[in-house]
Every structure is written in C-alpha cells, then in structure tokens.
Image (cartoon, rainbow, N blue to C red):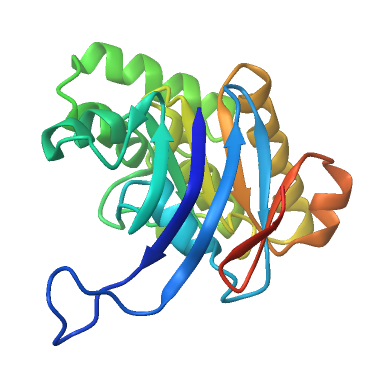
Amino acid sequence: MIICERVSLSYGEPGRTERSHGPAVLRDISFAVPEGGFRWLLGHSGAGKTSLLRLLTLAVRPTRGHLRLLGTDIATASRKDLPALRRRIGVVFQEFRLLGHLSCYDNVALPLRLAGRPEGQIRADALELLRWVGLEDRLRQHPAELSGGEQQRVAIARAVITRPSLLLADEPTGNLDEGQAERLMQLLRELNRVGTTVVVATHNDSLVQRYRAEALVLDQGRLVAG
C-alpha cells in the first residue's frame, strides 16, 4: 500500500531556482505499510509528521528517494495520473474543513457529486454513512449547529464515502474530548477491520496506549522507529 525508500523532502525557498531547495524537512525515510495495515504516526511538533502526510496525500513529491502509493511510483507518475490516485485516498483533518454553507448531508455527498455519480446512488451512500457515524438525525443541520465531535464524524463520513483504499488522519482527535476521541477511534478501527489501510497522526498518548498498533515515530525529520 505504501513503500518509502530513502525518501527526503525539502521545500523550495523564494529567490532560489526551480531546482534548488531549502533545508530537508524529511531525511532518508524508509518504511512500508501493507494493504489493510494500521499505523500510528508519532513525534513532537516539528518532527515532520505533517510533511510526511503531505507526501502521502500527493500534495508534494519527494525531493529524493522513491515513494510508491497504491502500486504507483509517485516520482515517475504523470500529472494527469494523480487525480485518479487521489480519489483512492481519504483525508481527515484536525480542523474538519467542512463547508459552512452546506448541510451535514450535502457535505458528505459532495465528493460523489464532484465525481458525477447519479443522485440516487449519492443519497443511498450518504444516508448509509451518516447512519454509520450516528448522525442520521442531523442531516439538515449545518456545521455551526454541530458539536466538535459531530463535525469530526461528518468529516470522516465525507472522507470515506468514495470507499478509499487508504485513509490518512492528521491529528483527528486534537479538538475532541476523550469521549468523542474514543468514538472516533472506534470508527477508524472499524474501517480498518473491513480492509481500509489507515495512518493516524496524533499526540494523544492515551489513545495510542489503548489502541495498540505499530507506530512510525519521527524526530527532526528522521524515522527513529517503525
């Protein structure tokens, strides 16, 4: 599912040539995650977790090394191949990123509408997922009318409605209390149980202790465990 081989990442700096880069934020990262695997992504602030997630969401490409996602070599993939690959990757953000002018239902339905799916299929899939996350009675509510935990569950439903092969979650419990974080983890583990590969970046040590799984641990841009 994910193969990183000596991957490094540097960001360009203003005034430099297109081929020049600033200091490396990731250095010689190597690891593999099998299909259906679950991994914690751990490390202090500034360790490189967000940069690694940007690589895995195809927001950037490696400066050096080889990254293979879902069977595709990212270094050699053409730009036109990337949108189809991105559609197989779901992302859950800490800050939810829901559209405030859309209802709970319409936020979840949006990815399928953008993909041009028939409205009948969209309705069936959106209602199924909203029932799954326990929000079938909140369909017409807008994000501002939902609690933080409810907004995060909407974000998960939206992220998985396209049935992604890989789900990436960036500090998904950061804005939640312990009860909400526990429910969120149960949803993520259920997704993993039915075959979705899941990578979760977190600072929540209590969740990591309760939900034992292999971890990728970063420190100053280097992989020190995993």
Q: Nearer the viewer, residue 158 or 225?
A: 225
Residue 32, x across and y down, in percent: 59, 36
| 172 shown above or below 114 | below
Residue 114, x across and y down, in percent: 17, 32
Q: Is residue 66 left or right of residue 75?
A: right
Image-quadrant location for residue 172: bottom right
Residue at (30, 55) in percent of width and height: 60
| 114 shown above or below 12 | above
Residue 52, x across and y down, in percent: 48, 56
Q: Is residue 127 left or right of residue 199?
A: left
Image-quadrant location for residue 24: bottom left
Residue 143 in view of the camera: yes
Residue at (44, 60) in percent of width and height: 8
Residue at (49, 25) in percent of width and height: 129
Q: Nearer the viewer, residue 126 or 94?
A: 94
Residue 158 in view of the camera: no
Kindly give the residue lying farthest to the bottom in the view shown: 15
Residue at (20, 18) in percent of width and height: 117
Q: Nearer the viewer, residue 149 or 211?
A: 211
Q: Is residue 207 left or right of residue 166?
A: right
Residue 20, x across and y down, in percent: 21, 74
Number of marks drawn: 0
